Amino acid sequence: MTYAEALRWIYGFADLERGVGHAGRDAYAAGPARTRRLLRALGDPHHGLTFVHVAGSKGKGSVCALVASAAEAAGLRTGAYTQPHLHSFRERIAIDGRPIDAEAFADLCERLAPQVERLSAAHAEDGPYSTFELATVLALAWFAEQQVGLAVIEVGLGGRLDATRVIDPAVVGLTTIVLEHTRVLGETLEAIAREKAGIIKPGVPVVAAAQSGEALAVFRAACRSQEAPLTVAEPLDWAGDIAARDGRPLMLAGAPDDGGSLPVGLAGPHQRQNAAVAWHICRALADYGLPIDRGAIRAGFGAASWPGRLEVVAGDPLTIVDGAHTPEAVAAVVEGLGEAFHVQRGPVIFGSLRDKRVPLMLDALRGYATRLLVVRPDHPRGWLPERMVRRYGLTGQVEIASSTEAALRQARAACRPGEAVLATGSLAVAADVRAAAGVPHEVDPEPWAGT
């Protein structure tokens, strides 16, 4: 396979994230059985690897980025499996911060394809494989082949029935729970927390973010039933200090054990909570026997980068992208802009996927946005701007942009001194504006070009 052929192959399967092939709870309810079967056919390459497993509604990627960066600083060859990607599918599978190269990705897909075909025919009653299941297997196989010392794995959806549940982690992380994917995971915080808590394994240490009583009660009960020790990570203390590094904010927080200065390369109030979860995960990994000492945590957290999260993509005027796609996350972004950049107002470029809580996200932006430019995210589930404006009766300083590039030009032209342009509402919007702003990035070939 060429890389384009490999993309065509993996995108040709059912994909709940893109809304292709199957939808709703039926896709999720299949559970990890197909993934486990496919790994068994490959000789269970993941057995023997050391894993961190992270679930939650908000902050999973940030926690994974911080833990992986600390492990790299400790000298460990570190794999990270996260999703979705910004620009290239290969970003989902990375070692020491570098995505898997196109040739290796295509080679893995070519080796996997005959096994998928054979097992699909032999177990047709189990339904079709999904893109996420196959990507999970690719990641685990690649990490095994490359002999990583630690693999940090982000749950795709929920936890209890997620394909990543095939791993046996050394530590489990549970981030903040909010209402999301309610048609699949449940309509209440308790129901969603139960799905997330499904990754807890007997006796395995769990680090959970401090949060609502409903979610924490579920986590505590699940840990008791699995005899798994639980640490509730309180947000890091912050003295109001923000430094600069490579043109972006570096938050100076207090370490949970001694209050000593702890630099964190991810800024914003929500990142104080995510960094606390990551810090306690790293300490649990040290207890497990990995060489992640306090010096490695300090160096790794300071060096951590997570593109598309309060990321500066242009200056004069300041232009910032963030992939926030829940009301809670958007509110944290607005607060973070004030903390890290000392801006309270500015034009907003906004787009959303159709299953998100758009009115509440817009409410969170109301105090910030001097002008709202609505765009369509480059995503199969993205709202068409005209339909979103009609659906939610948007009025006032709302404009439909003809393209992301046009929206960026208009927003930057409208930005006044002391303001900053913000692009948010979806990770796809963050990716589109990054590209329009000229941030260097890799671009995947169009999988179906020429077919």
Image (spheres, helix red, strand yellow):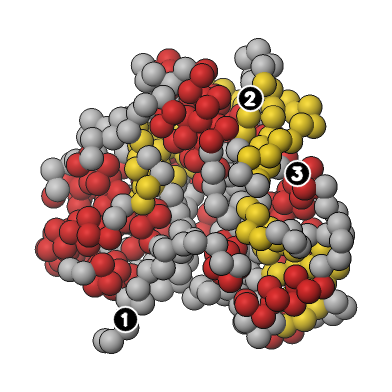
Residue name at image x 37 percent, y 69 percent:
444
| Quarter placement of the C terminus | bottom left
Question: Can the viewer see residue 130?
Answer: yes
Give the Cα separation between the discs numbered 3 and 2: 16 Å
Name the one closer to the observer, 300 or 285: 300
> What is the quadrant of the N terminus in the image?
bottom left
Query: Left or right: 359 with respect to 96?
Result: right
User: Label for residue 262?
Assistant: 2
The secondary element bearing badge 2 is classed as strand
Q: Residue at x 87, y 61 (%)?
A: 417
The residue indicated by pointer 1 is 448
Q: Amino acid at mark 2?
A: Leu
The amino acid type found where label 1 is placed reads Trp
Q: Are marks 3 and 2 in contact (CB under 8 Å)?
A: no
Residue 24 appears at what percent x and percent y?
Answer: 47, 66
The residue pinned by badge 3 equals: 340
